[in-house]
């Protein structure tokens, strides 16, 4: 409503769902698996190249494994 352009970023497995949401709000869908070691570097380079600067960043990422921190394995923690 205020004129912002939203770029939604999600895992390649979520391509259809992301595309549907971005279409609904006239945004842009980017696919990037954040578990990749160079994911942040790739996204930073793409943002600079295609958008220039970010005015607002909302980081709404994460998963739950229904365990307390003390009970999570190292692999589970790395996924989170």
Image (tube, grey):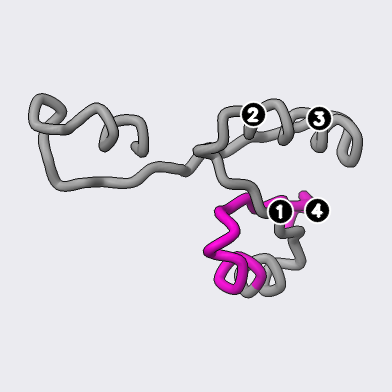
Task: Please identify, in this view, whether the residue under mark 4 or under mark 2 is nearer the observer.
Answer: 2
Residue of label 1 = 30
Residue of label 3 = 45
Q: Give the CA distance from mark 3 to mark 2.
A: 11 Å
Is residue 23 part of the magenta span, yes or no? no
Compare marks 1 and 3 and give the one earlier in the sequence: 1
Q: Give the CA distance from mark 1 to mark 3.
A: 13 Å
Percent x, y for residue 3?
80, 53
Quadrant location of residue 49?
Answer: top right
* Quarter of the image where the C terminus is located: top left
Q: Is residue 22 above or below residue 53?
A: below
Residue of label 2 = 38
Task: Please identify, in this view, whether the residue under mark 1 or under mark 2 is nearer the observer.
Answer: 2
Q: Which residues are magenta?
A: 1-19
Quadrant location of residue 44?
Answer: top right
- Label 3 environment density (alpha carbons within 10 Å; few <14, some 14–19, many ≥20): few
Residue of label 4 = 3
């Amino acid at each position: 409503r205020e004129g912002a352009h939203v770029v939604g970023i999600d895992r390649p497995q979520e391509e259809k769902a992301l595309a549907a949401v971005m279409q609904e709000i006239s945004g842009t869908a980017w696919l990037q698996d954040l578990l990749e070691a160079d994911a942040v570097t790739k996204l930073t380079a793409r943002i600079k190249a295609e958008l220039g600067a970010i005015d607002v960043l909302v980081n709404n990422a994460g998963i739950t494994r229904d365990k307390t921190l003390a009970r999570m394995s190292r692999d589970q923690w790395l996924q989170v």
